[in-house]
């Protein structure tokens, strides 16, 4: 499977993402999900950057598309298996998603690095889930280094995005209730002057700041829910 694409084709089809955003917004409404964005000013700024977000569920995609019109120019790093889930895989490819082989970190890094020049030139945001897989456990788990390698090698800022906990979702209890999610965009973290030796520290700094916001906003939305239920 080819992993590098003609960006001129992808630019011509960027309107597909806006359509997908509109559709996903309606899906969220049907599911009773309400997304509340904070730190909008960081997200709407026209700049090339590496967005790192926590990954709890497939619902993250709905939240991402809900704020897509604010980001405008953005692409996402996704596992290559999604490409074979047609017709969604084809649509995702046409929309500009970057597919990587998670089992081959060297090849994955090469694919992302190759796309970086275009990302810088066109001031595109690159969205990555650095945990690598979904964890709906009430914690932000350890990060993989890929996104931070790219950020430092290209000297692009890291833009942390934090989804509050999905308290309304439980696979164990087979429960899915309506819910409110706070999406917080933190100020960008500069990588200017950093080298490979700084990757670990940058990764830990980013995860620490995201974890603090995750716990604070999660407590907030759950307290708000408890207050409403108490009134009822």
Image (cartoon, grey):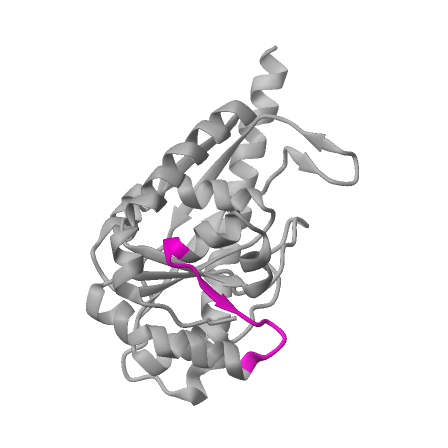
Give me the residue at 35% from left, 46% from top: 17
Residue 196: percent from left, percent from top: 42, 88
Residue at x-position 42% and y-position 33%: 23
Direction from residue 116 to residue 215 in the image, left or right: right
Q: Quadrant of residue 65?
A: top left
Residue 159 visible within the image: yes
**Quarter residue 150 falls in:** bottom left
Report the side of 229 relative to 108 (left or right).
right
Q: Is residue 82 magenta?
A: no
Indicate the quadrant containing the C terminus: top left, top right, bottom left or bottom right: top right
- Residue at the far top: name it: 232
Using the image, determine if residue 64 lies above or below residue 168.
below
Residue 97 sits inside the magenta stretch: yes
**Residue, x 42% and y 53% (percent of image)?**
161
Q: Which residues are magenta?
A: 94-105
* Above-or-below relation of 2 to 25: below
| Location of residue 186 in the rendering, given as x and y in whole percent from the top left corner | 36, 54
Residue 41 pos. (x, y %): 25, 48
Eyeballing the image, is 38 above or below 191? above
User: In terms of depth relative to the viewer, which is nearer, 7 or 26?
Assistant: 7
């Amino acid at each position: 499977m080819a992993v590098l694409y003609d960006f001129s084709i992808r630019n011509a089809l960027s309107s597909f993402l806006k359509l997908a955003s509109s559709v996903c917004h309606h899906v969220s409404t049907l599911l009773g999900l309400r997304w509340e964005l904070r730190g909008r000013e960081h997200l709407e700024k026209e700049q090339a950057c590496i967005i790192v977000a926590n990954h709890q569920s497939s619902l993250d995609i709905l939240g991402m598309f809900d704020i897509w019109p604010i980001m405008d120019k953005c692409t996402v790093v996704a596992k290559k298996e999604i490409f074979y889930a047609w017709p969604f895989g084809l649509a995702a490819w046409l929309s500009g998603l970057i597919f990587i082989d998670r089992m081959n970190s060297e090849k994955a890094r090469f694919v992302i690095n190759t796309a970086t020049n275009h990302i810088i030139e066109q001031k595109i945001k690159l969205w990555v889930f650095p945990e690598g897989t979904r964890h709906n456990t009430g914690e932000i788990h350890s990060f993989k280094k890929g996104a931070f390698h790219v950020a430092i090698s290209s000297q692009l800022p890291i833009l942390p995005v934090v989804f509050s906990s999905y308290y309304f979702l439980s696979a164990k209890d087979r429960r899915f209730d309506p819910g409110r999610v706070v999406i917080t965009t933190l100020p960008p973290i500069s990588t200017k002057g950093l080298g490979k030796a700084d990757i670990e520290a940058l990764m830990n700094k980013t995860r620490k700041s995201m974890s603090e916001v995750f716990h604070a906003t999660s407590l907030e939305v759950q307290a708000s829910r408890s207050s409403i239920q108490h009134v009822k």
